[in-house]
Amino acid sequence: MTGAPASLDVITMGRVGVDLYPLQSGVALDEVERFGRFLGGSATNVAVAAARYGRRAAVITRTGADPFGRFVRCALAGYGVDTRFVADVPGLPTPVTFCELFPPDDFPLYFYRFPKAPDLEICADELDLAAIGSAGVLWATVTGLCAEPSRTATLAALGARPRAALTVLDLDYRPMFWESAAEASRWAGEALGHATVAVGNLAECEVAVGESDPVRAARALLDRGVRLAIVKRGPEGVLAVAADGEVVEAPPVPVEVVNGLGAGDAFGGALCHGLLAGWDLPRTIAFANAAGAIVASRLACADAMPEHGEVAALLDGVPA
């Protein structure tokens, strides 16, 4: 993992897999007859979303040495995401994920990451720390801390960043990946010490900092040293609080929800774009919020990520 260009705008690190989503809505998984195959995985989706806006994006992840691993590489290349940090792990299958679709707010997920997901086999000594340190944004996830060697690698990547850089910790908490919430809280706290931006929903904030009230959660994240705390509140919209005291509240963007699972990743990619563009906080949060709404109105995750014009068009139709 050497030779990565110093000019990468966004490097994400973490989960990848194949989403097998039902082509029938309102039907239990045991009764579904048709599925669509899509690229998935939170960190991977964020990289795809950033690339949609013309950002030079790469993802650090691992797949199985199998047909689904080949699909992942092909899909990433098709979306314009640099694959130089994607490698095979022999003996471990590329993960697949199923969901059920019960709009507007019930989308159960079923992860098949056994015996262990390849993306948890990222090793610190494989990292190109120069590329990571010089990227415009590093996007890391709490899920990447749930097992070794990924935990040590994630912390090494975070530690390679200058303190003034845009280093985002996605609080992405999946309880099935952890022995306990307390263990997740411990390692989230360790990672927050390196982050300048933290993003999570209310449940994830409660695990990370022990607060589920949006304002208190944002303040607790700031107390950990981040400069920007973003709390996603579902149907109540998004709260962003900066270390300089600026507070932005974005209401939800009304759409007909098809599948809410990729909305947070769309938000993340758009957030990276806005931060890199130097937009003010209200514009950045509004843009990211709208991007998330667009993906919630579509079935897939990576494949559903919008381009700039689509987000701008939706914002133009939203009352100020």
Image (cartoon, grey):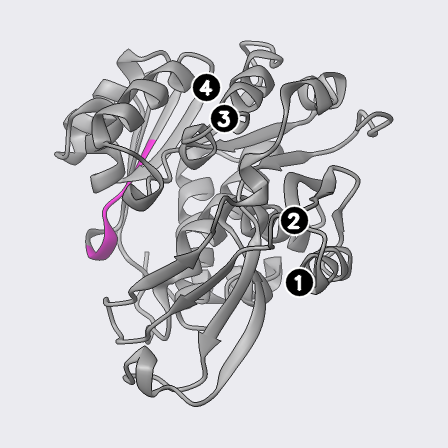
Q: Mark 3 — residue? A: 148
Query: In which quadrant is the N terminus drawn?
Result: top right
The span shown in magenta is 230-235
* 212 in relation to 26, above or below: above
Looking at the rendered structure, the secondary structure element under dot 2 is strand
Looking at the rendered structure, the secondary structure element under dot 1 is helix
**Among numbered discs 3 and 1, the one appearing first in the sequence:** 1
Residue type marked 2: Thr
Q: Mark 4 — residue? A: 195
Residue type marked 4: Ala
Residue 278 visible from this viewpoint: no
**Among numbered discs 1 and 4, the one appearing first in the sequence:** 1
Q: CA distance from mark 4 to mark 2?
A: 26 Å
Looking at the rendered structure, the secondary structure element under dot 4 is loop
**Among numbered discs 4 and 3, the one appearing first in the sequence:** 3
Closer mark to the observer between disc 1 and disc 4? 1
Q: Residues within 10 Å of mark 1 (few under 14, many from 20)?
A: some
Q: Are marks 4 and 2 in contact (CB under 8 Å)?
A: no
Q: Mark 1 — residue? A: 68
* 311 in relation to 248, above or below: below
Q: CA distance from mark 2 to mark 1?
A: 8 Å
